[in-house]
Image (cartoon, rainbow, N blue to C red):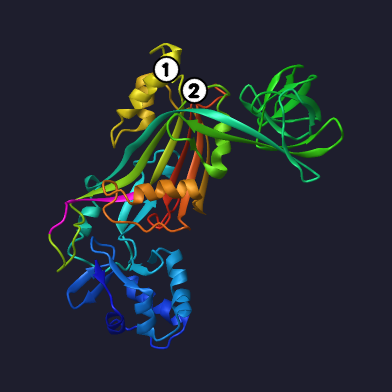
Amino acid sequence: MQRLHASDLQALGAPLKGGAQQIEDWLRGLLHGGTLRLGCGLIELRGSQPVATTLGDLKRACGVAMETVKQGLRALEMEHWVHLVDGVHTRLLGPPRFRVSVTKENIAGSVGRAIEIAPMDGLNPLESIDYDQLRRGESVVSRKRVLAVEKAALHWTARLRLASGLETGLPEGKTFTLAAGSQVRAAGRLGMLEEDLEMRAMEGREVRLVRPGTILLDTGEKLAVCGHARLQLERSNIIRLPDGQTGMLQVNSRARLDAAGEANWDDDSHWLARFTDGVPLVLLRRAVFAELSGVVHESCVGVGGVGSAVWRVALGVHDCFLDGSIPFRAGRCPLRASPEFLICFLRELGDTDSLREQMTRQFGFAVEAADVRLSPAMFAGGSLRALLRQVATDASLNSELLAIGNKTACWTQVGAYYRKGEAWPWEVTREAYFTFVDVSYRQHAG
């Protein structure tokens, strides 16, 4: 680790008696090129040798109060330019070495093939980066490595918040009136109630109609449902109890894994409700990274020895839930053995294998329809941040340590994929990508 003392910082132009904004501007200029010229030679900030200082050294170099130093660092820390380590040491990070772009082809579902990598604008030219190789398609390969394959089952919770503020559960067998306009699923088809209808609560998110009614489907059709028909509730709806009290009924879904508790998708968990109740599920989790061959070495000019010819850039994580009955429906095995059959198949996927191509080849399941939602920028929640940190700090997936703070910027794509003529999806997937690696996200027109 390269340690910068107060004298080193002063030699680099630390503003004496400057305010927080001056300190911030100085650090931005210092880090802009991605390298520092010190007495020992040229140091690459995002290289294999971390460059660190302390808040105390910054305070002495600038001759200001500690709070002023912290204010000058705060905006930079949010952008992953400066990372506080253990609240005392401060690791300096230059700009990302590459611009990683994702094209419209990626949004349509072809994740691995649509990643483009180019040198960042304004990056200092280092002999350790062969820019010409970045223009050769065979030098940049997108990969997905299997992190986990596990059986899962959907778990449902229903909470009723009454207008009085009281929160309670909804016991099985209890009757209530579901308001007109409430979203429900009938045999997998999403729609809304045309009028208020009396229901009886069943297990999980299921309810049973007390009398016949009509559902307005998303397609514009009207679907008549008979009395005692089973429906599935969606996220939140207004209900009225027999005693006249009204409230909001919230239904939440979680995928419970055999070995590791729950797979929590935070606000995206409701996408798992598209699976039919009782279907066995299998989780496939893969790390997404780009591999550059003959482009970058782990050392820069005048620093260290020759590094590896392969450089990896961690991009994100891909979670995918698959219908565990697929092998059975394809005639490959009995129903009771179907999830295990699918798990064995998924564990054999290679880094460059396309999941959907392999599913089509092995089982005949192809995507005929999709419903996809893209969130270009967001801050990762706790569970997602832990997954991204796992990828960013894995040396086999990422050749440089990425700083993951409490506010991890990323973007996500969530989708449900269907076979032709089927109302239930055979795949529900979520992809999450680092925003600070994917700094040039764009969608091409056309």
Number of residues whose C-alpha sits closer than 10 Å to that of mark 2, classed few (under 14), some (14–19) or many (20 or more):
many
Q: Amino acid at mark 2?
A: Pro
> Cα distance, mark 2 to mark 1?
9 Å
Residue 246 picture quarter: top right
Can the viewer see residue 315? no
Residue 384 pos. (x, y %): 46, 46
**Rendering coords of residue 359 (x, y %):** 38, 25
Secondary structure found at label 1:
helix
* Residue occupying the point 43% across, 69% down: 76
- Which residues are drawn in magenta? 306-315
Residue 60 x, y percent position in the rendering: 36, 83
Q: Are marks 2 and 1 in contact (CB under 8 Å)?
A: yes
Left or right of 86? Residue 225 is right
Q: Residue furthest left?
A: 305
Which label was assigned to residue 280?
A: 2
Give the image quarter of residue 50. bottom left
Dividing the picture into quarters, in which one does residue 340 lie? top left
Q: 210 left or right of 308?
A: right
Residue 264 against residue 332 in the figure, above or below: below
Packing grade of label 1 (10 A; few <14, some 14-19, many >=20) is many
Looking at marks 2 and 1 on the same chain, the residue that comes earlier in the sequence is marked by: 2
Q: Nearer the viewer, residue 86 or 437?
A: 86
Depth order, front residue of 104/308? 308
Quadrant that contains the N terminus: bottom left
Magenta span: predominant SS is: strand
Q: Secondary structure at mark 2?
A: loop
Q: Which residue does the numbered mark 1 point to in the structure image?
A: 338
Q: Is residue 107 above or below residue 47?
A: above
* Residue type, numbered disc 1: Ser
**Magenta-drawn stretch contains 308:** yes
